Amino acid sequence: MNASSARTLKGPRRFVRRVAHRANSPQWQFLRGFLKNPVMVGSVIPSSKVLIDKMLSRVRWDEVKLFVEYGPGVGTFTRPVLELLPADAKLIAIDTNPDFIDYLKKGIEDDRLIPVTGSAADVQKIIEAHGFAHADYILSGLPFSTLPPGVGDAIGEATAKAIRAGGAFLVYQFNPKVRDFIAPYFERIDRGFEWINVPPATLFWAWREPKAVAAE
């Protein structure tokens, strides 16, 4: 093969390598998921580290046996959760997008992670299928305000039933109306805000109070 032919082949090969690298990057997967189903992905840009740290700061990690995440995407929260999760605990990550679930299975090698393709509204069935009666904490970045009618309420109710007494539903949103979907099902809701994120986000920690749960 002469030098001219070799140069001709190198161009397409470099292009293929660039495309393959981009296709495997978290940023590309996240954008691809947003474009594929924007109703189920809250933002085109993953959450900031500042937001992640603030959202997870109220978790009592030494008490966690099961942590559940709704809409893990490419693992922006999943990886930090695994870093803090006790060695004997599990993290069930639920996403309706099978591309994200496949990405997590291939990209994160951790026996504590259980990626599941499914709906957050079925959280109780999913955790029971993996041998748990309840979750200690559930985290969500799902865009409640853009979900189909009735879905947000169904997720709020199902989540409250799935969390143990003393546990909490951790929610970060760009539209504070999410409170309307969770307030009917939780006894106490703390609220925060984080400017260092694109876009800035409202944070909620919705708690299941032990006395209220015991009285049900």
Image: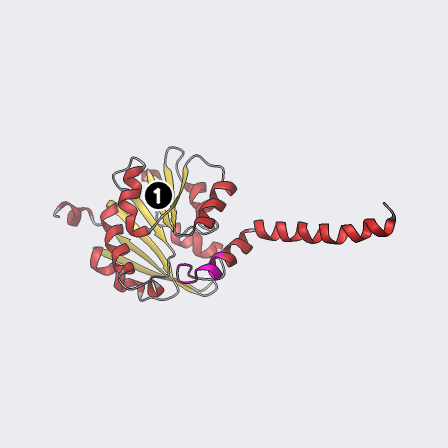
Q: Main secondary structure of the magenta part?
A: loop
Whether residue 37 is in magenta: the answer is: yes
The answer to which of 39 and 163 lies nearer the viewer is 39
- Judge left or right: residue 157 versus residue 32: left
Residue in the picture at 75% in, 54% down = 11
* 139, above or below 176, in the image: above
The image quarter in which residue 136 lies = top left
Q: Residue furthest top?
A: 88
Instruction: Tell me the magenta residue range.
Output: 33-42
The answer to which of 61 and 71 lies nearer the viewer is 71
Across the whole image, how many numbered discs are drawn on residues?
1
- Reading the image, the residue beneath label 1 is 67
Whether residue 58 is in magenta: the answer is: no
Q: Position of residue 95 (x, y in %)?
A: 39, 50
Q: Residue furthest left?
A: 215
- Judge left or right: residue 111 versus residue 189: right
Dot 1 crowding, Cα within 10 Å, few <14, some 14–19, many 20+? many
The image quarter in which residue 68 lies = top left
The answer to which of 5 and 65 lies nearer the viewer is 5
Give the SS element for disc 1: strand
* 152, above or below 92, in the image: below
Name the image quarter holding the N terminus.
top right
Q: Position of residue 41 (x, y in %)?
A: 42, 59
- Judge left or right: residue 20 versus residue 104: right
- Judge left or right: residue 139 versus residue 216: right
The answer to which of 166 and 172 lies nearer the viewer is 172
Q: Position of residue 110 (x, y in %)?
A: 46, 36
Q: Position of residue 212 (x, y in %)?
A: 16, 50
- Residue kind at label 1, given as amino acid type: Phe
